[in-house]
Image: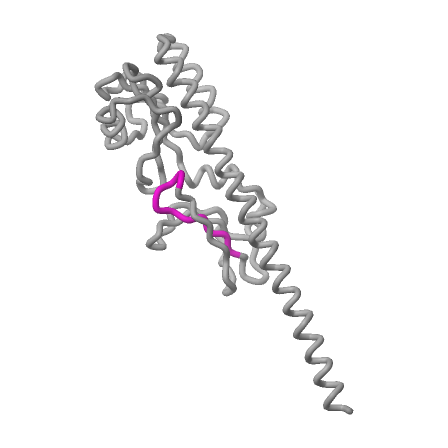
């Protein structure tokens, strides 16, 4: 009788632990999908801005107005490090915030050589912790590019209640971490990975629970 009771208790403990582990896995996957959609939405906001600027430039809106609109978007969305307007040959015409602002010459050359207009921005390769995307609004128009900082994007758009529970990373397929939110150690349990390609070629989004007793500071 005692053996049967111990066996029953052990089975109950196992069932409870198994159910809790399944609930934790479900919550992790749900939170990971939420993070993915949040980041994709923010990138789409920046893409839409670039499309509007590209169309404005193609319709001969003056440079001063383009610069004002670019600066307004960058002030509200600091992950955008630069917005550059190039002529049809790829030469920079307007560089915001200044001449030393980051850009992607390889992407610009690809858009110039492609010739045809693009309805949505085209992404270049991730360089360090930045990525540039560009658009050619019309066949005979110039090219507009924007460069985004991945660490700033994570810092601004991953809320504290996610950062308290998880480490969030954008990493290359080789495991190299390109950007992360939260400095706490992660636990030994498995995290959740989602392909982030597109828009960022050769990347995955990783969300991993913090080690027991470890949390990131609220921001």
**In the figure, 108 relative to 17: above or below?**
above
Residue 201 lies within the magenta run: yes
Quarter that holds the N terminus: bottom right
- Please tell me which residue is depicted at 56% across the width and 58% down the height of the picture: 214
Residue 155 appears left or right of 58: right
To which quarter of the image does residue 140 belong? top left
* Boundaries of the magenta span: 198-208
**In the figure, 139 relative to 213: above or below?**
above
Towards the viewer: 208 or 118: 118
Residue 147 appears left or right of 217: left
Figure label count: 0
- Please tell me which residue is depicted at 52% across the width and 62% down the height of the picture: 187
To which quarter of the image does residue 218 belong? top right
Residue 29 appears left or right of 204: right
Towards the viewer: 103 or 20: 20
**In the figure, 8 relative to 182: above or below?**
below
Which residue, as the protein is rendered here, is positioned at the far right? 1
Residue 90, position as x, y percentages in the image: 24, 21
**In the figure, 150 relative to 168: above or below?**
above
- Please tell me which residue is depicted at 51% across the width and 34% down the height of the picture: 41
Residue 57, position as x, y percentages in the image: 36, 13
Colouring mode (rainbow / by chain / secondary structure / one colour): one colour
Residue 194 lies within the magenta run: no
- Please tell me which residue is depicted at 35% across the width and 42% down the height of the picture: 201
Residue 29, position as x, y percentages in the image: 56, 53
Quarter that holds the C terminus: top right
């Amino acid at each position: 009788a005692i053996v049967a009771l111990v066996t029953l208790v052990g089975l109950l403990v196992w069932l409870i632990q198994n159910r809790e582990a399944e609930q934790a896995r479900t919550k992790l996957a749900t939170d990971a999908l939420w993070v993915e959609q949040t980041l994709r939405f923010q990138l789409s906001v920046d893409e839409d801005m670039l499309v509007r600027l590209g169309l404005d430039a193609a319709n001969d809106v003056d440079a001063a107005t383009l610069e004002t609109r670019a600066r307004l978007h960058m002030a509200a969305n600091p992950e955008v490090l630069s917005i550059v307007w190039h002529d049809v040959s790829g030469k920079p015409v307007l560089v915001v915030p200044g001449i030393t602002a980051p850009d992607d010459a390889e992407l610009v050359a690809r858009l110039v050589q492609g010739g045809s207009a693009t309805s949505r921005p085209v992404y270049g390769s991730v360089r360090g912790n930045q990525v540039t995307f560009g658009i050619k609004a019309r066949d005979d128009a110039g090219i507009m590019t924007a460069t985004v900082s991945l660490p700033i994007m994570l810092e601004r758009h991953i809320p504290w209640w996610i950062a308290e529970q998880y480490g969030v990373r954008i990493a290359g397929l080789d495991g190299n971490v390109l950007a992360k939110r939260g400095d706490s150690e992660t636990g030994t349990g498995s995290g959740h990975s989602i392909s982030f390609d597109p828009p960022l070629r050769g990347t995955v989004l990783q969300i991993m629970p913090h080690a027991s007793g470890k949390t990131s500071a609220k921001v």
